[in-house]
Structure formats: C-alpha cells, structure tokens
Amino acid sequence: MFRTIKELVDQAETANLSISEIMIQSEMETTQNSRTDIFAKMEKNLQVMEKAVERGIHEEIRSHSGLTGGDARLLQRYTQSGKSLSGNVLLDAVSKAMATNEVNAAMGIICATPTAGSAGVVPGTLFGLQDRLNPTRDQMVRFLFTAGAFGFVIANNASIAGAAGGCQAEVGSATGMAAAATVELAGGSPEQSADAMAIALGNMLGLICDPVAGLVEVPCVKRNAIGASTAIVAADMALAGIKSKIPCDEVIDAMYQVGRLMPAAFRETALGGLADTKTGRALKQRIFGGNSNVHRPALKEK
C-alpha cells in the first residue's frame, strides 16, 4: 500500500517494478481478488472507454440540452485534412477526449476517470496515442492501472471533486493521471511519471468549476480536450528529462489548499465564471426557462 506519490515511486524503484504493477499488487492485497479477476475488471473499463470514443467520433451525438455534440467529429475531419497546426497525435487525443465527454453529456455510458465530468482526458490521451505507440492490449490496461495509482493518491490526500476543489481537482486530476500513465506507456521511469503528473497538475492550479446551467457540458467538454493535450505535453517534457521543481506530493497539497480557499461561486455551484456570463445566463434560461437572473441549484448529469 502507498499513501503518497513518493511512497509509490520508491516502492516501484526498490522492487524494480512499474507503477502499474505496484497498483495491481496493491489491488490484489486490498481486495483479495486474483490478478486475473482484477485485470479482467480493468479490461471491462477499457472496453467502455473504447466504445464511448468510437461513438463520439463516428455517431451524431447531441446532448439533451443542445449545448454540446458533434465537435469531436468536426475535429476528426479537420485532423484528417492534414491542415492542423498541433499535429495529428495531439489533435487525435483531443478529439477522443471530447468524444467521451459528448457521449457523457448525451447520457451515454462512460467510465468515470476519476469523475464523469472529467471522463474524457484519460481515454482521450490513451486512444490518441494508440497509432503513435502501438500498445498491446495488456499495456493499455496497465495504462489505466497507472492512472488509477496516481488518482488514488490525489483522492486520499486532496480531492477529485469539482464541488470541493474546483475544476483543478476534477479535470486537473485527470490530466495529471493521464500524463503519468503516458510516461509509463512510452517507456519512462516511475520518477518521470511523477514529474509529468506534477507538471500537468501544477499547470491546472486555480482552474474553477463553472458549469453553464449547472450541466457538465460547457465548458467541461473543451476543458477535457485541452487536458488531454496538456497530459501529452507534460509527459513529453518529463521524458525529455525536465523535472518539476516542486515535488508531486507538494503540488497535490497545493491543489488541495487552493481548492479550500476557492470561493463557493467557483466550485460547481454555477454561480460564477462562465456560468454567470450574459450568454451563460441566457443559455440557462433557454434550457430551464424562468428568470435567468435567478440562479438555480447546480445540477449534474451523472
């Protein structure tokens, strides 16, 4: 068992094991289930993610509110045109992150990683890297175990809920998890995974949670998309040998402290930020009716 990122990295390096293997062994010890059963359950999560991505980039997905849908397909077509500035790997990951969140907004089946509102970053990053790294199915499942190990530490030492710590805690955590897992998938060390996580999460500090009309669609879908791009860039930085000056555990603690100091208006209440703009209030009135100047209690779709 591990409680901090330092303990996680130390255990992996001392035993000369990967982060994913440490997480698998921890799960076996905690649940008393066999390696086969634990692996099979994670494989099912991977299948759910895969189906959501496929739906989002191939089907005409629209949310009930009409706020989101179709952008993942739009970005796929743009990427395939060869005119993109960011490059195919990055934009493929971005589009697949959006695909997952668009399916979530349309009440489709997704796998929360770590929450429904931040469900796009981890699968978007993983499936976006598929053509570049050609991972085996085993490696793809291990990607999720590695992401889970880092998310486990965040959840136990800080928060993964936008309502508690803002969007930095939700999409920020997903971004850090994906960055760390990307490093392992690309052949990096446990320490480099921790650096990638620290760089990614550190870049998300202060990100507020301000869902328009209380729905996790705007700006959430696009924030997941940018989270996937941040995860890949942070992983590349760590793989290049760039270290985070602030240790990963301290970055997590900083995120927790920022969340505690964040006004309630910016913690998923839909009372501030983009939710409280003129257009945000108008969208809320269109969806729910009534006086757009009167705030309703925050709603979440999942």
Image (cartoon, helix red, strand yellow):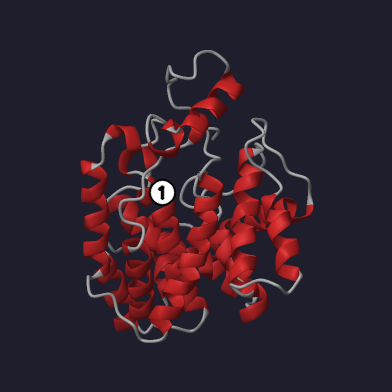
Residue pictured at 41% horizontal, 79% vertical: 237
Q: Is residue 147 above or below residue 131?
A: above
* Quadrant (top left/top right/bottom left/bottom right) for the C terminus: top right
Occupied quadrant, residue 96 = bottom right
Could you say which is closer to the camera, residue 83 or residue 148? 83
Q: Nearer the viewer, residue 59 or 51?
A: 59
Label 1: which secondary element: helix
**Taking 222 as reference, is 258 left or right?**
left
Residue 134 visible in this rendered orientation of the protein: no
User: Residue tagged by mark 1?
Assistant: 170
Which quadrant is the N terminus positioned in?
Answer: bottom left
Q: Amino acid at mark 1?
A: Glu
Q: Is residue 262 left or right of residue 292?
A: left
Q: Is residue 101 visible?
A: yes
Residue 95 drawn at (x, y percent): 64, 59
Give the x, y percent position of residue 146. Answer: 45, 67
Front in this rendered view, residue 263 or 121: 263
x, y (%) of residue 56? 71, 51
Residue at 44% across, 52% down? 171
- Residue 252 is situated, as x and y percent measured from the top left of the image, at 27, 58
The local crowd at label 1, few if under 14, some if 14 to 19, many if 20 or more residues have their Cα within 10 Å, is: many
Q: Is residue 292 above or below residue 86?
A: above
Residue at 73%, 74% (x, y): give it: 82
* Quadrant in the picture for residue 32: bottom left
Left/right placement of residue 33 relative to residue 192 reads: right
